[in-house]
Amino acid sequence: MTQTIAPRVRTLVLLLLAAACALLAGAGPASAHAAVTGSDPGQGAVVDKAPARITLTFSEQVALSDDSLRVLDPEGKRVDTAEPANVSGTTYAVPLHSGLPDGTYTVAYQVVSADSHPVAGAYTFSIGAPSKTSVSVSGQSTDDGVVGWLYGFGRYVSYAGFIVMAGGAAFVLACWRRGSGVRPVQRFVVSGWVALTASTLALLLLRGSFTGSGKVSDIFDLSLLGQVLQTKSGAALVSRLLLLAAAALFIAVLFGAYDKREDAEEKRDLTFGLSIGGVVVAAGLAASWAMSEHASVGLQAGIAMPVDVLHLLAVAAWLGGLGALLVALYRAPADTPVDAPAVRRFSQVAFGSVLALIATGTYQSWRQLGSWSAFTDTRYGQLLLAKIALVVVLVGVAWISRRWTGRLAQTVPEEAPAVREKERVGAGAETASDADIAAVGDGETPGKGEGDSGLDTDEHPDSERAAQLARQQAARDAARQKRMRDADPNRFGLRRSVLAEAGIAVVLLAVTTVLTQTEPGRTEQEAKVATSASASSSADTGASGALTLNMPFDTGGEDGKGIVTIDVDPARVGGNEMHVYVERPNGRAFDIPEVKVEFTLKSKDLGPLPVVPDHIATGHWSANGVQIPMAGDWQVDVTVRTSDIDEVTVSKNAQIG
């Protein structure tokens, strides 16, 4: 039976691994987690005279380097004059040379978002009129090439290593303590530690090149490594390495001193200590992801990080324990088979983990998507739907495994005497007979007849022969028990269902890894709204000469999202007419309790100059005689209040005068 199963197992595992690799390879470049929500000049805009600086607004704070923002003229030469700097909130600017000639200019950016993921892209604007440019803006991606692929693969291995190590150790302590002395289970857990340690070191080396040039030659650049160590991601990776040292000590005790303890009270105390220590170390390792990725930024970060830690621990307990159970079912020695009580205990642990995953996953989904439409309209939402579908299938297969567990025989059936006699006769040419073993018990020398001088010349032939026969008999008994165990249809059914669970888990882990590298749906939708508004602003400015600014807002309350549009005509020094329009994301007019506007010219320390427009119609406010005292790059701040307590201020810079 075992010989028939093994090839099928190997084939299925290889197919599942190939499917996972194909999923990873086919995912393409991972999107960044911060998005450009505004720029001045806007994408495709045509301005009358050269701006003094270029500003970009992101959906969250980003980290800048010397070359994070570059402005190139039509010939591809840089025209920015200094390092980029933060001017307000999430808005960053780089100054330009004065007197730039007419033509099309390219703005290229490469920054690192607050959740550690690189953001890169480019767009063009024109001075005077569009022209030909030698700069290519296509193919701008932060993780194209070998370094990006290696970094993504390293993330997958790190997640898998943590799940195998933490989940396998939890399975031994909580479900099957006899497994601490089973070599295949020991190798399974240790392999998880090795994979997580190796991948963490690799990610630390790859990080500098991944967020910078993307060149393979920069992987071992010590100066880049020094810069990485000063970032939040570098600190998280170093913390993970320190915790892995503690995990190595935990594993050594679990598979060393713990297995050798025979006193029941001592073993109980050691179990308690290992359980507390293991939870602390595992939670610390999970926190190394939570404090540097999605959970650390955005809405309710203080709640999101512990929820993310709990989510990772639940995944490890379920999927890692599942892997350990699979190893035990297929590789455990015949004299130490995994028993039904252990499988039932794991079933209870898995059920609790699934409940925790549902609760934490629901919260994470709300936090990262923000709307039902994001499920189908964004790549993050589509991947999340695929993950949910896989979890549902996995739970269904787990239910089948639970049924097999209920019928699993706890003991190996007694073998019929006729079967034992047939095996003894068939193996007589290769192993000793039962008569030989009986002869050893009577003190005779097996294999010698009366008058036979014998051929053994060793000093103690009887004891050596007896030991040999005992080993042979033990091997025969173990093989017989293994055949009987494998012949149990309930155990065979459990094996197959657990194997199917493990295969689905491999694909689920691949989808999850891609999901963590994908721009959240909430951010993607905000970026789409901002891009559409920017395009509309550029079109309006070119047609009428009036200044139009579109700014998405979200006060955080119920019905708190929308777009506020500021029209200033003629956008020159002196008196101007200003109109304010507030719309919902779907474009319908939106009445809110209050709108206030302020103009600030920071270069001259002028302002803020407040303007309170009058309400004209639904979603429309107006003010006449708005005085702009001098020309310059003005910051326009709009305060939007959607309820008694929910308000937000959004900003944008504009050249007026």
Image (cartoon, rainbow, N blue to C red):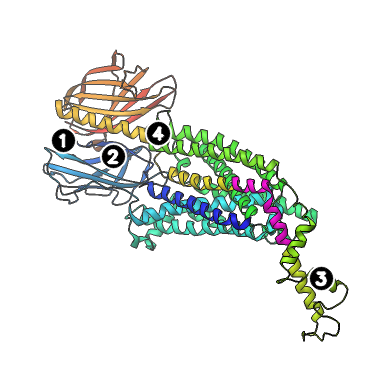
Residue denoted by label 1? 47
Is residue 239 among the parts visible in the rendering?
no
Give left or right: position of 248 versus 539. Answer: right
The circle on residue 418 is none
The kind of residue tagged 3 is Ile
Residue denoted by label 3? 437
The kind of residue tagged 2 is Leu
Crowding at dot 1, Cα within 10 Å, few <14 / some 14-19 / many 20+, comes out as many
**Image position of 92 with respect to 560: above or below:** below
Depth check: give the residue in front, 579 or 383: 383
What is the spatial separation of the Cα atoms under label 4 and label 1, in whole angstroms?
A: 31 Å
Residue denoted by label 4? 522
The kind of residue tagged 1 is Val
Residue denoted by label 2? 56
Q: Which element is circle 2 on?
A: strand
The residues colored magenta run 477-497
Residue positioned 81% across, 70% down in the render = 437
Give left or right: position of 544 versus 40. Answer: left
